[in-house]
Amino acid sequence: MFFIRDLKSVVTSKTINHFLITSGGTAINGLLGLFFYIIVARSLGPSVYGTLAVAIAAITTIADIADLGIDTAVIRFVGKPAKSDTALRFIKLGLEVKLAVWFTILTLGWVLAPLIVHSIFLKPEFIEPFRLALIGVGGALLFSLTTHAIQAYQKFWAWSLVNISMNSLRLTAILALTAFGIFNLQTTLITYITVPFLGFFITLFLLPNFLFVKQERSVSRELLHYSKWVALVGILTAIGSRLDTFISARLLTTTEVGIYAAAVQLTIVVPQLVFALATVVAPKLSSLDSQQKAITYLKKLQLLVLGLSTGGVILLPLMIYFIPLIYGQDYRASVTPFIILFIAQLVFLLSLPVHQAIFYYFSKPRLFTWTALGQLVITAVLGWVLISKWGILGASLTILFSNIFNFVVPAVWVIYQFKKGDKSEQEKYLGTYLS
């Protein structure tokens, strides 16, 4: 009875309504993205697709590092009840920091590209894609800032429509390139990095005018104090979450990297689902003012992700059947890595409630410094050993072990904090009663 009552409260909650909006948008985005990567993978072949996958991994990794925790801080402070000008100052300061960091990375990275590529990958053919990736970092940083600001204002319809529009534009551009016979690695990568810049300029019209707000430096101490731990976590997580791809790019052939990237891409629907949920959950958790409210909310959220994970397991055999049909026989070796990676991503989905609680309720992003460091060590050491021995299968197992670690450690910490909080509240009540 209690389970049925809790389940009913989950289904009828405001969170599930907002989640349906964002998850609907995410589902459409996922399909558009999947069509994009299927067309690209089938047309380019595993070897060239492997090079593209490394370039895209470089964009996302460098952008996540260069973010310096700004996006999370924007949600944290803009999502709070605050004066309008104060919220706008946080967004503008975030924009200024991101632009400065991007120009620095672009300048240094362009000059040092040959040295970086030869040192990390031992593949000189990666130099030109890497330089294009450095340009793409700017679009990723800017578009991420404005979409997180939209998220902080809880404009979920706008958030969904913007992402759908950008993914539709990217897919349409690829189809046009194919029709005109100019589809190759370079044009595909240029298309990929151009769309976020367009998305950034469009989102400026969906937000309050923050570009002309003054005294943005007045919130710098508050912003940087919070974001410094998030930035450190972001650096460790960004490297650790894609280190499997970079190690594979060094130790394996580009064809093997392409096959592995195809398996990874099919599992991306789960992180997108996590992102859709986090879009709704983060502002809500930031506004909760009592432990009991937080526990009640997180229980409902855990039930929701458990149900979604169960659905994923049920659908797994069907997805396995369609892999060779989707990508073609050249990618049939991606089936086994896909199974392992999909299970790993379901573990990641299950960890969403504790992760969001730590970031937005407890405001303790520094905890993820240690878990991210642990993940980085696991991926670096275990990844090198397993990839050297078992190739792309070893890379998949590395991600699974890393995600299990990233679920268990934060979960233990959150449970301990809530139990400690319960004890403190009981002692406080007893003291009041005796007095």
Image (cartoon, grey):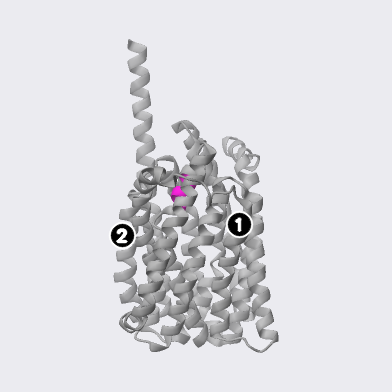
**Residue at x-position 44% and y-position 62%:** 99
In magenta, the rendered stretch is 71-76
Residue at mark 2 to residue at mark 1: CA–CA distance: 34 Å
x%, y% of residue 128?
Answer: 45, 84
Asked if 30 appears above or below 16 in the picture, the reply is below
Please tell me which residue lies in front, 213 or 302: 213
Residue position for label 1: 203
Residue 403 badge: none
In the image, is residue 267 above or below residue 180?
Answer: above
Q: Main secondary structure of the magenta part?
A: helix
- Residue toward you, 187 or 374: 187
Mark toward the viewer: 2 or 1: 1
Task: Give the SS element for disc 1.
Answer: helix
- Residue 314 visible, this orientation: no
Label total for image? 2
Q: Quadrant of the C terminus?
A: top left
Looking at the image, residue 120 sits to the left or right of residue 89; the answer is: left
